[in-house]
Structure formats: structure tokens, C-alpha cells
Image (cartoon, rainbow, N blue to C red):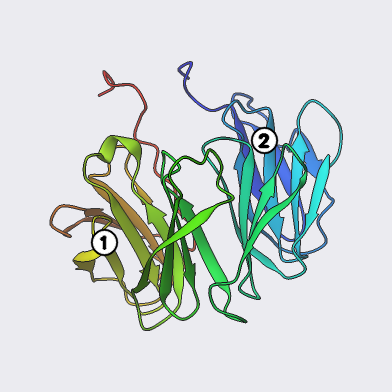
Amino acid sequence: MSANTPVSLFLAGNPHIRLFDIASSSTQPVMTYDSHTSNVMAVGFQCDGNWMYSGSEDGTVKIWDFRAPGCQREYESRAAVNTVVLHPNQTELISGDQNGNIRVWDLTQSSCSCELVPEVDTAVRSLTVMWDGSLVVAANNHGTCYVWRLQRGTQTMTNFEPLHKLQAHDGYILKCLLSPELCDPQRYLATASSDHTVKIWNVDGFTLERTLTGHQRWVWDCAFSVDGAYLVTASSDATARLWTVADGETLQVYQGHHKATVCCALHDGSDADAP
């Protein structure tokens, strides 16, 4: 493994989270985190790997510091948490829940600093933040994306300025994802839906660039390549697909699963000189 290869892997289920050491030959978890009482829907790492966060259908968002035992902080969302993202400033978590609430959790103050309800009683399924913290997008069960940007001059995510409302799909949006830094100056939003399609939107005006068709059932997840040139998708049709973003062509269909594939990740290297 190279110095840039991650050595920790978190796997979450119902209700446990388990930490694995990738560098080890052991298949047993290094640590198990048991504080949640229902299905864990989201996990993620702080940039330096000092702590992780999780969100669960038990209605809580939790912080786990690897330098101390147990759960260090717990935030009550009062509804099943479907999605959690960490702002690039590393000091704020943003969560979306089944009742349609979006909350910003200020980790420096250990409190909720902002609450938004784009549509009452419409579940927020997915959240995504632009790599530079300039945009936040929330996608819901009505196929709608709500877009906010930071008000000029602010330094935190707590002041949202409404920018756009996008009716992206007729069905559920199961995942929304903004393109990574190396994709610039082009900036895209990908939306994956229960209508069997993935759509690519140009963030400049939120115009539809192309619709990716080929999956036969719900598309649950998607992931951009590090340069934003490719997209991987996972579907209930038991396949994953690799697409070119520029023309929407399918490069590869990955088969072998006998049941739905509901999540995906793409590791295509972080070194400029890598093959």
C-alpha cells in the first residue's frame, strides 16, 4: 500500500458500526461501536482521520473520537436521519431526516445552529456539499433538489441563501452528488432516482446536460471519478455501471450480484503520476 492509501474502513448496519484495519490480514473488526439503536444510514471521516460521524434511523447524529472511548457527542434530530455530510471547514455537520428537516450541527458550539424545512413531511434523502463549501444541495422524495449558497462574506454554513429549486425527477431522488475539485471549471450535479435514470446537471444555471439510461430498476447511488470525467452507479437491477460524463455512454456493466446493489465507491488514485 502507498502512503496515501486509507488504512481504516467503517462498515455500518443495523445498528452496529465496525472499524476494520485494511493494512491488517485479519478479517475481524478492530473496534465495534454500539450506541445506535436502529439502522445506520450514513458514516464519514474527518479529514485528518481523528474522528468519524454517523447518522441513524434512531433519530441521532453521533461523533466518535478515535482518541477516546465510546460516543463523544450525540445530536437529536427527532426523526429518522437519512443523510449526513461534513462541511469542508470540518466544523459543521449537515443532516437530513425523514420529516424533511435539514439541520446544521456546529461542532465548536456542540449545538444546532440552523434548521431548514424545504418541504414539510417530505423526506430528505440525500445531501451534498461543493468541495469549496460554496453550495449545498438537498434532494427529496418528490424528486426535487433545493440548492443554497453561502451569503457573501460569511465563513460558516449556517447562513443559507436560496439559489435554485430544481424539479429533477418524477420519482424519488435517492442520491445527489456534486462533482469534485479536479472537475473544475466544469461543475456538475448528478441525481440518481427511482425512475431508473441518472441525470447530469450543469451547476451554472442547473440546465440538464444529459440523462443516463440503461438501468432497469431504482438507482440508489453514484460516485464521480476524481477528475469528474466518469460516474459509477449502483442499481436495484443488481448491476453497477461505469459512464462517461461527457457523452453519457456506458463503458462497462458490472454484474455478479444476485440482489440489489445499493451503494458504490470509486478509488481511481490521488497521485498525479499514478497510472
Vertical arrangement, residue 271 with respect to residue 122, above or below: above
Q: Quadrant of the C terminus?
A: top left
- Which residue lies at the image location 53% right of the left edge and 28% below the top edge? 6
- What is the crowding at mark 2: few (fewer than 14 residues within 10 Å), some, or many (at least 20)? some
Residue 273: name its quadrant.
Answer: top left
Q: From the viewer's perspective, is residue 117 above or below residue 178?
A: below
Residue 155 percent across, percent down from the top left? 53, 38
Mark 2 or 1, nearer chain start: 2
Nearer to us in this view, 2 or 175: 175
- Residue 98 in the image: above or below residue 42: below
Element assignment for label 1? strand
Q: Amino acid at mark 2?
A: Phe
Q: Which residue is mark 1?
A: 200
Q: Tell me the kind of residue under disc 1.
A: Ile
- Could you classify mark 1 by the number of other residues whose Cα lies within 10 Å: few (under 14), some (14-19), or many (20 or more)? many
Name the element at disc 2: strand
Res. 190 in view:
yes
Q: Relative to 121, say whether 55 is above or below.
A: above
Instruction: Give the mark toward the camera: 2 or 1.
Output: 1
> In the depicted view, which residue is nearer to us: 86 or 243?
86
Residue at image mark 2:
20
On screen, residue 238 versus residue 45, left or right, reads left
